Amino acid sequence: MVVDDNERLRTVVRDVLQPAADLRVVGLASSGAEALRLAAEVAPDVVVMDLSMPNMDGVEATRHLVSRYPGLRIVVLTGSLERVHEAFAAGATAHLLKESPACELETRIREAVASR
């Protein structure tokens, strides 16, 4: 599942992951609140989470998701390392800067799944 308030970025992440036969994007959410609702429906193994979103940010959404679904892995995708430590304290599994190469996202997701 991909959570980001930027529609273009959600689409790019989905398109980057689509060729990977062992990875499937089960949902796209534009906010932390939407992510909570969608996770209950699609039961993702991994969530790719933006940190900077209006209303419920990625740190708060991560905290709620990990509390509800203890086996869930969260890969934080962010433009800045400023709040990454907060995301890890909330239960994030890994992080990646938005400007990182696309192949790194696949690697981080696979590492997150392997850590289950």
Image: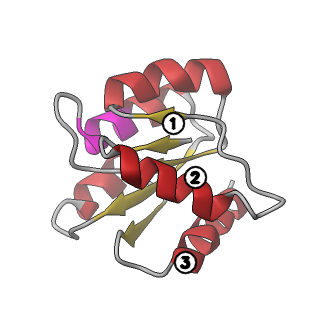
Is residue 19 visible in this depiction of the protein? Answer: yes
Q: Main secondary structure of the magenta part?
A: helix
The answer to whether mark 1 and mark 2 are in CB contact below 8 A is yes
Q: Which mark is residue 14?
A: 2
Q: Nearer the viewer, residue 25 or 44?
A: 25
Q: Which residues are magenta?
A: 57-63
Q: Nearer the viewer, residue 2 or 51?
A: 2
Is residue 49 visible in this depiction of the protein? Answer: no
Mark 3 lies on residue: 104
Does 26 sit left or right of 29 as displayed? right
Q: Which mark is residue 28?
A: 1
Residue at 68% x, 66% y is 110
3D distance between C-alphas at marks 2 and 3: 14 Å
Tell me which label, 1 or 3, sits earlier in the chain: 1
Tell me which label, 2 or 3, sits earlier in the chain: 2
Task: Verify whether residue 59 appears in magenta.
Answer: yes
